[in-house]
Amino acid sequence: MDRISFVKDSIYKGRVFHKRLVPFEHQFSYNLSYLWIDIQEKKYRFLKYNKISLISFFDCDHGEVGRNTSQSLFSYLKNELENKGINNICSIKVLCLPRILNYQFNPITVFVCFSKKEKPQAVIFQVSNTFGERHAYIRKLPSKSNRNLKKFHVSPFFGVSGYYKIKFEISKTMVKLVIDYENKNKKLLIATYDGKAEKINEFNLLGLVFINIFQNFKVTLGIHYEALKLWFKGATYNKKPNKPKKFSTKI
């Protein structure tokens, strides 16, 4: 189950691991640095909100593609939660790759929604694909299950069937995300991110930019490079289906 603490803003530096198990094994890993920030608070000089900068966070990078961005991301997500029967949300924190040099691509973004007493009420796993689409899986907390049906096309080498088992932990020292993709009681893929916390301040934000200046480009190029290798290995290509009619699915 999820183990989530109300953690102050942080930088998490860690490693992504991705392993396909069928019809053959194929794996890769690389380092990534994520931000953990409140989506409403704007308190850093070098981290700009909705403004182009070396490092920035834009509301329009999240939620349904093409939505009315005159509504703040907080209000938008709060409405999504209320429509699913989840109320009393006072703050939302996000684990994401920020824009660096005005570019970002987040294969998965995690939003944790807290009550006034800083108790986690829900977690939103927002998934993006390389076709410019996004979909969110919403889990009310506490939850008895970490399993949810797959509703969204991500990789052309997997169909839209089966289910995910997602575990998420975050504390003041570490973050861990584990995704198992299964179909017909057979595990098809494992994806993880393990990161260690670093204090967020202006100096470390600048360090994030200059040390990881190409990390977001690396993510996008890496996805296409690994897809090309899968194609050469003989993985079956699946035609892209239509995206879900609704942006979010409640687990």
Image (spheres, grey):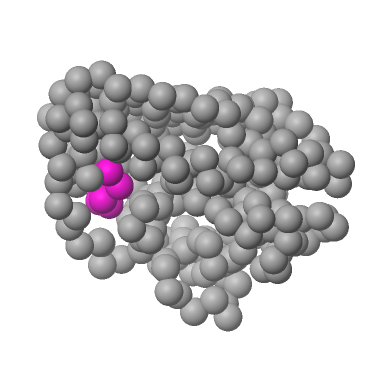
Q: Is residue 40 visible?
A: yes
Report the residue at 55% width, 53% height from top. 104
| 178 sits left or right of 47 in the view | left
Q: Nearer the viewer, residue 229 or 186?
A: 229
The count of marks equals: 0
Report the residue at 16% width, 24% height from top. 23
Q: Main secondary structure of the magenta part?
A: loop
| 219 sits left or right of 8 in the view | left
216 shown above or below 54: above
Q: Is residue 39 visible?
A: no
Q: Nearer the viewer, residue 106 or 213?
A: 213
| 202 sits left or right of 31 in the view | right
Could you say which quadrant of the image residue 43 lies in?
bottom right
Please identify the quadrant where the N terminus is shown.
top left
Report the residue at 81% width, 55% height from top. 46
Percent of width and height locating residue 61: 53, 62
Could you say which quadrant of the image residue 74 lies in?
bottom right
Q: What stretch of residues is rendered in magenta?
A: 149-155
| 27 sits left or right of 61 in the view | left
Percent of width and height locating residue 151: 25, 51
Report the residue at 47% width, 63% height from top. 63
Percent of width and height locating residue 9: 74, 44
Q: Residue furthest top?
A: 25
Q: Nearer the viewer, residue 92 or 14?
A: 14
Q: Nearer the viewer, residue 51 or 185?
A: 51
Percent of width and height locating residue 87: 52, 61
Asked if the stretch drawn in magenta spans residue 79, the answer is: no
